[in-house]
Structures are given as structure tokens and as C-alpha cells.
């Protein structure tokens, strides 16, 4: 029997509190070498706090984390050498050109000049920015800046890539391109990739998905495993008016309510749908049934839909600054 591979990233009972707010509550998981691992949850769930701990910016109150065997608290320099990190907040220097941003990053990490130039050319080609090499960063679109940040993280010998909401604020086309680049980089460079997101559709292709909310892990499995264990068909109903909504709630209750005013019911079996229509069919504008999906998994575990929210102030506290990678508070 062959020995098990050592985890690329190990998180053991990590806890973090901001005053009375418990941001992370004894969080534990392993990420195996070469895995595409997603942390899925709404803003404020604790994802960014965990990323800042893994990136050695923030110290946990309890537990420990390792990057390829190096403790992020006791061996932060060694952990950083193996990490490439893209934070939610922009960290490029917009006074420099595309090439200068990459070159400066390589110098900071001590990458020899000849190797640094070769890697810059490789990464510019991968993220399709070769024609923009002499442009100042301030002239780039949001999507191009994100691609540049991803390229920059791989100029040095990073083995683990961590991206905190890498596609937030981007249009659908740019988001799709970012995920395409990530998949290509992972396969070509044998990277371990950890991504945080609140876009459910983005994690379908990940090896494992960790659903986190209020600082706690609710479920951890492959997308297929999560659907099999927690997925339920969900019925969405839009009542005709306030009176109809009251009558429906009094009769059936509701699992949750969506931002657009729909009532959610689960599990939405054929028998339930038939019974609902027989009693309240005339009181609804429309209805829709969703088969088991990661969205219904999240609803089943949390009782609410995953939707955009403002990031918690504490999750925005630590980030790389806009000027040359300085830490800001």
C-alpha cells in the first residue's frame, strides 16, 4: 500500500475572533496536492479571514495552518515562498507598467534576472497580456488587472495559489476567462488552487467544495457528493399579492424567501407540488421547481439563498495596499 500524500495545505482547528464576533470557529480541512479546492459562502462567512491567516498576514487565536508543511505562524517566510495570493482588494501599483509590476514582484522574491524575464514572458502569454506589456496598469480594465494579478503570483516558485473572490465585480465573460486561465495554470504547473467565492456556478468544476457560513464549515465534499448528501428539489412560488402570501404561509409555511419576493419550499416532491397547486394555484403569479444543485445544497444547509452581500468590515481590514504591496490597516 503506497503512503498517502502529504497535504499541500493543512488547517487544524483554526479560530479567530474580532471582539465579540467569532469569525472562524474551529475550522479544519486538508487540501491535497494538485486539487482545485473552493471555499463557498456569502461575504462575511469567514472566507477572507481564513485567507489572511493562510497568507501569514493575520494570526489565528487558536489552531494552526501549514503551507506544504511550513507553519504560517512559526515559519511565515518559508510559507510565503510557496504561496501565490490574489486578494479581494487590488494590490497592483498603477503607476507602473504591466511588465514593471511583474518584474518588481520577481525581484522582491529573489528570482534571478534571466529566469525572471523568461517567466514574465510565459505568464504574459498565458493571460493574454503580451500586447499590453508597456501599458500603465491604470489603463487596464478590471478583468485585465485580475489576470495580471494572477500572472504576478506565479513569477516566483509558488506551489499553492490562493485567490480570494478573484472574479467579484467582473462581467460574465471576464469571469469565464479567469476560470479558464486558472484551470490551464493548474494543469500545466501542477498547482494546488484554493478559491473563495460566493458565485455557486463557479465551483461546479472544483475537486472539492467547502461550504462555510458564520465561521463554521457546514459541509465538505465533491460537488457530486454534496448534491447526493444534501441536495433537495426546491419549489419557488411568487404569490399574487400580500393576502395570498399570508394564506400560503399560514397553510404551508416557507423554508426561506428570496430577494425578489419568492417563497421557497423544500423538499419539493411531486406530491407536494400537486397538493400546493390544488390549494393555492389561483393565488400565485408563477412557480418554478429546481432540481438538486449546489444552490439547493446551500439552501438546505443554511435555510437561505446565497447572494451578494457587503463584505464584513473586519474582512476588509487586512489587505495588500495599492502601492508596492505594503500592508495596510
Image (cartoon, rainbow, N blue to C red):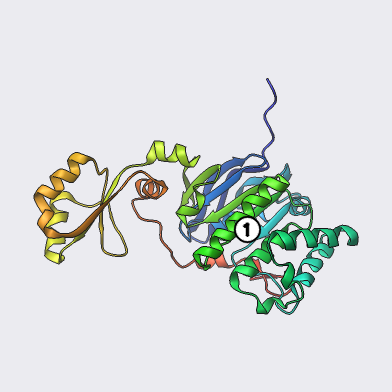
Residue depicted at x 67% and y 56%? 55
Residue depicted at x 68% and y 74%? 322
Tell me residue 145's x, y (percent).
Answer: 65, 69
Residue depicted at x 75% and y 52%? 158
| On-image quarter of the C terminus | bottom right
Q: Is residue 142 above or below residue 60?
A: below
Tell me residue 327's x, y (percent).
Answer: 69, 68
Q: Which residue is mark 1?
A: 52
Q: Using the rendered image of the protein, determine whether residue 56 is visible from the camera's viewpoint.
A: no
Tell me residue 215's x, y (percent).
Answer: 49, 52
Q: Residues within 10 Å of mark 1 (few under 14, many from 20)?
A: many
Q: Is residue 294 above or below residue 23?
A: above
Q: Is residue 59 above or below residue 241?
A: above
Tell me residue 249's x, y (percent).
Answer: 17, 55
Left-right relation of 123 to 60:
right
Q: Residue furthest top?
A: 1
Q: Using the rendered image of the protein, determine whether residue 294 is visible from the camera's viewpoint.
A: yes
Amino acid at each position: 500500500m503506497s503512503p498517502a500524500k502529504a497535504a499541500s495545505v493543512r488547517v487544524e482547528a483554526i479560530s479567530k475572533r474580532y471582539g465579540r464576533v467569532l469569525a472562524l470557529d474551529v475550522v479544519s480541512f486538508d487540501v491535497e496536492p494538485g486539487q482545485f479546492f473552493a471555499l463557498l459562502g456569502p461575504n462575511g462567512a469567514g472566507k477572507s479571514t481564513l485567507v489572511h491567516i493562510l497568507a501569514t498576514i493575520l494570526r489565528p487565536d487558536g489552531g494552526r495552518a501549514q503551507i506544504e508543511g511550513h507553519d504560517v505562524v512559526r515559519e511565515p517566510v518559508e510559507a510565503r515562498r510557496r504561496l501565490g495570493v490574489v486578494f479581494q482588494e487590488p494590490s497592483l501599483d498603477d503607476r507602473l507598467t504591466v511588465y514593471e509590476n511583474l518584474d518588481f514582484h520577481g525581484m522582491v522574491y529573489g528570482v534571478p534576472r534571466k529566469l525572471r524575464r523568461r517567466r514574465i514572458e510565459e505568464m504574459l502569454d498565458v493571460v493574454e497580456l503580451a500586447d499590453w506589456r508597456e501599458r500603465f496598469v491604470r489603463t487596464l480594465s478590471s478583468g485585465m488587472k485580475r489576470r495580471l494579478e494572477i500572472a504576478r503570483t506565479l513569477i516566483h516558485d509558488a506551489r499553492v495559489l490562493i485567490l480570494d473572490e478573484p472574479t467579484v465585480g467582473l462581467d460574465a465573460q471576464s469571469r469565464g476567462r479567469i476560470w479558464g486561465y486558472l484551470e490551464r495554470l493548474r494543469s500545466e504547473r501542477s498547482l494546488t488552487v484554493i478559491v473563495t467565492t460566493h458565485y455557486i456556478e463557479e465551483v461546479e468544476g472544483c475537486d472539492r467544495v467547502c461550504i462555510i457560513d458564520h465561521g463554521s464549515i457546514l459541509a465538505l465534499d465533491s460537488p457530486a457528493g454534496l448534491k447526493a448528501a444534501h441536495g433537495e428539489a426546491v419549489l419557488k412560488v411568487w404569490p399574487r399579492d400580500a393576502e395570498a402570501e399570508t394564506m400560503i404561509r399560514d397553510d404551508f409555511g416557507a423554508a426561506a424567501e428570496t430577494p425578489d419576493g419568492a417563497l421557497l419550499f423544500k423538499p419539493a416532491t411531486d406530491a407536494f407540488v400537486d397538493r400546493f397547486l390544488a390549494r393555492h394555484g389561483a393565488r400565485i403569479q408563477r412557480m418554478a421547481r429546481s432540481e438538486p444543485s449546489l444552490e439547493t445544497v446551500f439552501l438546505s444547509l443554511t435555510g437561505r439563498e446565497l447572494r451578494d452581500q457587503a463584505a464584513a468590515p473586519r474582512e476588509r481590514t487586512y489587505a495588500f495596499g495599492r502601492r508596492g504591496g505594503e500592508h495596510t490597516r
